[in-house]
Image: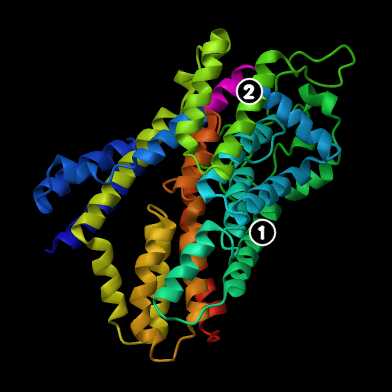
């Protein structure tokens, strides 16, 4: 049996054990990386650790540390309250505000994970307070980031358009951008309808000063709704129609309300935290500084100034999520070292049936990108598509757009950077359930979107 096939079978075993035995998948993946890397690929420890995502580790730790401090001192409560006032109490608009915000950030040049790292913790705090499905809110943030991710001035758009030009293929920057924008917008609309959006519209406007009452009325919060994705408990995954019905979320009264009850006070600690969050945005988007290192540095400053508020913040870092993501991505690094991904791509490229090869490449892009770099996999797959694109039976513009959509829309996977950031922003009590929801939803996206992108963009022969 070839090393490539062994490495794939081991990955399947890791998924099965993690699913059936409730063992942290990251720990299993570290063990698998050690076993496969040592026994099959003849890698030493340095070769195995080459796949460890050190940058993502720091991002996850830094961002969750900073926002743990923001939760502890009430800054996220203040932001949620301000957001409700901004939309005049129309809670149903908030998921779309988060979608538009992350889309705008990536469209003007923010790296997708940086935009998600900034927006996701606020979005998930809002979801908790107002009994909005965490799955709805989290996926709206990720799909928003991808909706703007291929604008002509964006990072992803510039990279993919550069690859197309380097390979001598015909390209269309506008088609690439619109394909991703429309695909993610349609998906967001479907999610909004399926996972509580209609209930949110029916709820109408809420008064910001009634924060403490939100979630206590089972009719208004959607308790008993058939979407099963609310913030309540339940033994099932709670995913999709027919899942476990959510319970109403009990939300604590707004802290430090002023004498009129009109809102939260801005204390010195909260003002400093807001300044730190703004500094994070400016540093990442304006000066291209690393989001993780910047967040850790800001968190340390706040912890030094207000140690009482920050004492428990380190314990609230999403350590189980960090282990999960870093372990899986380390194993993916071993797969890349062995050549498993290249082996699979070359096998598909040599099929000889252009349309079949095109759809298989879209699926490979989706599956691999759910665990690894979206842009990285596009950089590998677009050159593999050149031989059959040169035959003229497949339109290059449509094929590149289909690969881009397939490889990025799956970033809702909890094993991708964006999915991991959303998962880390969820409350600890809901994180395991939310992980299962993202797993199921990510699997549906991987199964459905590549085929749809191929059917809409490749089969008609665009370009």
Whole-percent x and y of residue 362? 43, 70
Q: Which mark is residue 330?
A: none
Would you say residue 69 sits in the magenta stretch?
yes
- Closest to the observer, 24 or 225: 24
Tell me the quarter of the picture where residue 385 sits. bottom left
The residue under label 1 is 190
Farthest-out residue, bottom: 392
Magenta span includes 72: yes
Q: Which mark is residue 273?
A: 2
- Which SS does the magenta portion mostly show? helix
At horizontal 54% and vertical 34% (from top left) the residue drawn is 425
Quadrant where the N terminus sits is bottom left
* Nearer to the camera, 146 or 368: 146
- Neighbour tally class for label 2: few under 14, some 14-19, many 20 plus, Cα within 10 Å: many
Q: Residue at x 54, y 72 (%)?
A: 452
* Magenta stretch bounds: 65-74
Judged from the image, the secondary structure of the residue bearing numbered disc 2 is helix
- CA gap, disc 2 and disc 1: 35 Å
Compared with 29, 408 (above or below) is: below
Asked whether residue 229 is in view, the answer is yes
Residue 370 position in % (x across, y down): 42, 55
Q: Nearer the viewer, mark 2 or mark 1?
A: 2
Q: Nearer the viewer, residue 355 or 75?
A: 75
Side of 460 relative to 97 (left or right): left
- The C terminus appears in which quarter of the rendering? bottom right
Q: At 38% across and 59% down in the image, what residue appears?
A: 376
345 up-or-down from 107: above or below: below
Residue positioned 88% across, 11% down in the render: 259
């Amino acid at each position: 049996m070839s090393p490539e096939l062994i490495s794939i079978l081991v990955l399947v075993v890791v998924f099965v054990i993690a699913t059936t035995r409730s063992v942290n998948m990251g720990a299993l993946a570290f063990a698998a990386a050690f076993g496969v890397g040592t026994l099959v690929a003849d890698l030493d420890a340095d070769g195995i650790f080459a796949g460890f995502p050190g940058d993502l580790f720091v991002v996850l730790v830094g961002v969750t540390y900073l926002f743990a401090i923001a939760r502890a001192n009430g800054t996220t409560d203040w932001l949620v309250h301000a957001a409700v006032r901004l939309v005049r109490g129309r809670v149903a608009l908030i998921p779309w505000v988060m979608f538009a915000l992350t889309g705008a950030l990536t469209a003007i040049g923010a790296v997708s994970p940086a935009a998600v790292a900034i927006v996701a913790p606020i979005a998930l705090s809002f979801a908790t307070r107002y009994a909005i499905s965490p799955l709805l809110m989290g996926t709206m943030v990720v799909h928003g980031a991808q909706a703007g991710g291929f604008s002509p001035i964006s990072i992803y758009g510039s990279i993919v358009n550069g690859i197309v030009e380097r390979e001598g293929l015909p390209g269309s920057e506008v088609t690439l951008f619109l394909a991703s924008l429309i695909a993610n917008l349609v998906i967001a609309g479907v999610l909004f309808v399926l996972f509580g959006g209609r209930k949110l519209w029916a709820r109408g406007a809420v008064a910001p000063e009634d924060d403490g009452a939100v979630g206590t009325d089972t009719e208004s919060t959607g308790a008993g709704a058939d979407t099963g994705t609310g913030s309540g408990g339940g033994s099932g995954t709670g995913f999709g129609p027919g899942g476990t019905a959510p319970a109403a979320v009990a939300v604590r009264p707004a802290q430090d309300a002023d004498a009129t009850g009109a809102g939260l006070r801005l204390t010195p600690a909260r003002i400093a935290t807001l300044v730190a969050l703004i500094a994070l945005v400016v540093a990442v988007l304006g000066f291209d500084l690393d989001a993780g290192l910047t967040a850790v540095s800001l968190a340390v400053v706040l912890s030094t100034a207000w140690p009482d508020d920050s004492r428990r913040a380190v314990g609230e870092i999403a350590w189980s999520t960090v282990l999960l993501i870093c372990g899986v991505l380390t194993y993916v690094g071993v797969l890349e070292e062995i050549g498993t991904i290249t082996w699979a791509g070359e096998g598909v490229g040599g099929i000889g049936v252009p349309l079949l090869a095109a759809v298989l490449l879209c699926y490979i892009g989706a599956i691999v990108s759910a665990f690894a770099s979206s842009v990285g996999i596009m950089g590998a797959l677009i050159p593999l598509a050149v031989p059959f694109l040169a035959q003229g039976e497949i339109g290059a513009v449509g094929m590149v757009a289909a690969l881009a959509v397939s490889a990025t829309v799956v970033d809702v996977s909890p094993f991708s950077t964006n999915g991991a950031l959303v998962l880390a922003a969820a409350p600890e009590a809901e994180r395991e359930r939310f992980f299962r929801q993202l797993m199921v939803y990510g699997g549906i996206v991987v199964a459905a979107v590549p085929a749809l992108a191929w059917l809409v963009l490749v089969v008609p022969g665009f370009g």
